[in-house]
Image: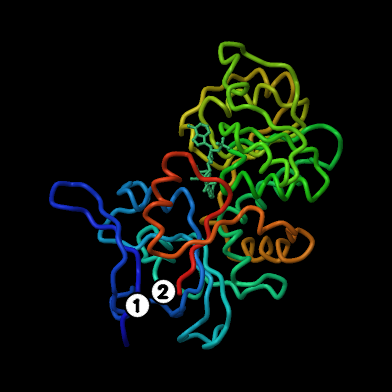
Amino acid sequence: MGSFKALQTSENADGRFETRVLEREIEELPAGEVLIRVRYSSLNYKDALSASGNRGVTRNFPHTPGIDAAGVVAESSVSEFAAGDEVIVTGYDLGMNTAGGFGQYIRVPAAWVIKRPAGLSLRDAMVLGTAGLTAALCVDKLEQAGLEPGDDPVLVTGATGGVGSIAVALLASLGYNVAAVTGKADQADFLTRLGAKQVVERGALQAGLEKPILKEQWAGAVDTVGGEILFNVVKSLRRGASVACCGLTAGTNFQANVLPFILRGVNLLGVDSVEIPLITKASMWDKLSLQWKLPNLDELVHEITLQELPDAIERILAGQQVGRVLVRLD
Ligand code: NDP
């Protein structure tokens, strides 16, 4: 059937992991109902974990990471999809233990595939990618828990990152007063351009860890980092407010005490964008293509090729990513 270009991570004899672009055969792809010619993918933190040999994400190597893919159906053995359909695949096992979007072709179960909504190009879909889907799910959960646009500040942590930057842009476009937490003092202008009204230095969210509860400040929060920052976010939510917890860049563990929950009735909401039903993903993509369509996606994207991915992977692992990295599969 032919060969295609893909990024591949392999484990050397000395246990070190190496990532490079090479040619793969379409026959080598796993079984699945839909073969897709990938046009765009994107870089997420989880891809960098996979590409650096994290066994919690990817068990077996060599492996092609890439949890996101948007492209054109090349072959389909099911009636729902036909050659030429433009489609999006995010999450499930894509890029974890199934060869992912950092290759020009993927073959996946039809149950993972969504038709591109009319209001989003394939490129825009991957500027958003899993990060955008996750940010949207966080905002959706917060609104279901009662959050409404208003003057009280809504906090976003890890604000210059992929999920964080889209959460800032989305909340701002919906009329929220966004306070963006960042460790990158030089990126304040970027966050203001995305719509943040206030930029908070990360250190401010790391102070007061010893206190059981902090001054009420936030009407809601999207937390993309976890760790001790999440502990402080919970302690500084306003009465009845919620935090949507979706990430772990600052750590998987966090301390907690019951006081914010029993004195202020705050809520900790978990967000998963990977294993949720396809219908939930599709409804979020529809929202992102219509009433939640972001006008300023170009502000937050940096476009690269497969060859440039290894350097970008190093940057995201070092916490240096700003906005989204779009990967073009020429
Ligand atoms: P990025 O690396 O793009 O963003 C993470 C941001 O967190 C960084 O840019 C930085 O922002 C901040 N950060 C980095 N290191 C630290 C640290 N040590 N302490 C505090 N803040 C830090 O990653 P993504 O946006 O792709 O993903 C964010 C998180 O969300 C990841 O943990 C990822 O695994 C998770 N995720 C979860 C999903 C789900 O379904 N639940 C789906 C998608 C992602 P700044 O410098 O501005 O503070």
The residue sitting at 74% across, 35% down in the picture is: 154
The residue under label 2 is 104
Give the side of residue 192 with respect to residue 6, left or right: right
Counting from the top left corner in percent of width and height, residue 155 is at 70, 34
223 relative to 117, above or below: above
The residue under label 1 is 4
* Numbered mark located on residue 170 in the image: none
Screen quadrant of the C terminus: bottom left
Q: CA distance from mark 1 to mark 2?
A: 6 Å
Counting from the top left corner in percent of width and height, residue 101 is at 44, 66
Q: Kindly check if marks 1 and 2 are in contact, taking CB atoms under 8 A apart as contact.
A: yes
Counting from the top left corner in percent of width and height, residue 120 is at 68, 70
253 relative to 272, above or below: above
The earlier-in-sequence mark between 1 and 2 is 1
The residue sitting at 58% across, 22% down in the picture is: 203
Please state which of residues 40 and 322 is positioned toward the viewer in this rendering.
Answer: 322
Q: Dot 2 lies on which element? A: loop
* Number of other residues with Cα within 10 Å of mark 2, as a class: few under 14, some 14 to 19, many 20 or more: many
Give the amino acid type for the residue marked by disc 1 in the picture. Phe
The outermost residue toward the top is 210
User: Does label 1 point to a residue whose CB lies under 8 Å from ligand 1?
Assistant: no
* Number of other residues with Cα within 10 Å of mark 1, as a class: few under 14, some 14 to 19, many 20 or more: some
Give the amino acid type for the residue marked by disc 2 in the picture. Gln
